């Protein structure tokens, strides 16, 4: 007789919880990535347990895709880890916990409100545009 | 309070596991690691007794127990080890345990593929990167953890909720081991996804029919994803001209 599907589900959940603890707790970038892979192990086990329960292949196909995505994710994560290591020469995640620039200040001084305009007041009149300029004859002679 | 007394099989492994993990996770001052290891063994034992009741002691139950303990123990050692190289190797041990459970779930091809890809490629790549990026010994940030109490308590609460839900489902109906093939119950929509007896659940032939019949687009997309990820990894990786690695 096979082991019931609930046992496999519980083992998958325990693996997921352990991976979550490792992900949230450890400070080494590589160990964080490994904990994410451990969570993916738990999820794959869950998929396969249900696949065996229903007798279909959907869970196994999903596990194959999870494996593919995990391989892509591991490769890209390691490239990013190497690039980050080159910047700060350390694998500590706390160095990257604040991604904002230090000198960027997004608080601007408050703009004073404009005084309300009285609609009955006479508005100032500007001089009409397009007035012909006055040319001084002496400047034109000295420019040559 | 009465509920706590009657449901001790649910929360006792959780509490023991939480205390064990809190003690075993690396910290600058030397904690009671022996007590943590003992509590971890107690947690695994009570979890096996309380959550995984064994009806008959057949070979499958023994195999399940061996693989489950390997997977969970390897995972526990992985997240609590101070050296990242040892942690990567414990992850390989946990992967072997998980692949044993894959075989018990009638997925031998996926078990072999997971061992090859994870323990063969991913762990080796991780060990390479660790060797490249960590020239000195165990550094300060390897001996310290952040948010230890919150992470352990939150994860154990989540685990308790999951186990409680699964146990409610187990109590509601009888547990089912293997269901008959779907084609025997109702005709599926796609004729290619009808697994005949020769293409049963554990066969590679049936898995191939499902993968390339039902999920052909997904398979092609996964291949494109692998290509794009390779290009991305080469693009993101730092050059030697940008500075010494």
Image (cartoon, coloured by chain):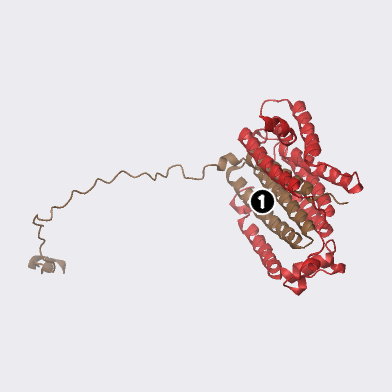
How crowded is the residue under tag 1: few (<14 C-alpha within 10 Å), some, or many (20+)?
A: many
Q: Check the residue under mark 1 and report the chain it is in.
A: A
* Residue ID for mark 1: A78
Q: Is residue B143 visible?
A: yes
Please provide percent x and percent y for residue A136.
8, 66
Please provide percent x and percent y for residue B20.
72, 31
* B138 shown above or below B201: above
Residue closest to the eye, A7 or B126 = A7
Q: How many marks?
A: 1
Chain ID, brown in image: A
Quarter of the image where the N terminus of chain B is located: top right
Q: Residue furthest bottom?
A: B191
Please provide percent x and percent y for residue A46.
74, 52
Q: Is residue B19 visible?
A: no
Callout 1: helix, strand or loop? helix
Image quadrant where residue B14 sits: top right
Chain ID, red in image: B
State the residue at coordinates (66%, 51%). Answer: A78
Image quadrant where residue A129 sits: bottom left
Q: Image check: B57 left or right of B9?
A: right
Residue closest to the eye, B182 or A21 = B182
Please provide percent x and percent y for residue B75.
75, 42
């Amino acid at each position: 007789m096979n082991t019931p599907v609930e046992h496999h589900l519980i083992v998958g959940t325990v693996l997921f919880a352990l991976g979550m603890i490792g992900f949230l707790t450890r400070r080494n970038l590589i160990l964080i990535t490994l904990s994410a892979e451990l969570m993916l192990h738990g999820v794959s086990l869950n998929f396969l347990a249900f696949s065996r329960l229903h007798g279909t292949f959907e869970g196994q196909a999903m596990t194959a895709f999870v494996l593919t995505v995990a391989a892509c994710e591991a490769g890209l994560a390691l490239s990013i880890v190497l690039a980050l290591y080159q910047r700060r020469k350390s694998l500590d995640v706390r160095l990257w916990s604040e991604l904002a620039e230090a000198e960027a200040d997004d608080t601007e001084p408050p703009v004073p409100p404009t005084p309300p305009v009285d609609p009955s007041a006479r508005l100032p009149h500007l001089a009409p545009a397009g007035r012909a300029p006055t040319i001084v004859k002496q400047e034109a002679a000295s420019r040559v | 309070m009465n509920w706590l007394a009657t449901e001790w099989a649910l929360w006792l492994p959780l509490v023991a596991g939480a205390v064990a993990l809190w003690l075993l996770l690396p910290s600058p001052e030397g904690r009671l690691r022996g007590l943590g290891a003992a509590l971890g063994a107690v947690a695994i034992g009570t979890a096996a007794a309380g959550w995984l009741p064994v009806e008959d002691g057949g070979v499958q139950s023994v195999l399940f127990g061996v693989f489950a303990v390997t997977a969970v123990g390897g995972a526990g050692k992985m997240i609590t080890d101070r050296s990242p190289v040892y942690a990567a190797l414990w992850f390989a041990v946990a992967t072997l345990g998980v692949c044993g459970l894959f075989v018990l779930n009638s997925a031998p091809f996926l078990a072999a593929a997971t061992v090859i890809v994870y323990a063969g490629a991913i762990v080796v790549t991780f060990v390479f990167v660790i060797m490249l990026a960590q020239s000195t010994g165990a550094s300060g940030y390897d001996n310290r953890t952040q948010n230890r109490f919150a992470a352990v308590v939150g994860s154990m609460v989540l685990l308790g909720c999951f186990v409680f839900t699964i146990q409610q489902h187990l109590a509601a109906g009888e547990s089912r081991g293997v269901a008959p093939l779907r084609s025997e119950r109702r005709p599926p929509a796609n004729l290619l996804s009808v697994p005949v007896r020769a293409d049963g659940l554990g066969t590679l032939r049936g898995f191939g029919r499902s993968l390339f019949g039902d999920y052909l687009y997904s398979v092609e997309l996964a291949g494109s994803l692998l290509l794009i990820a390779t290009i991305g990894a080469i693009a993101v990786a730092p050059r030697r001209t940008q500075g010494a690695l």
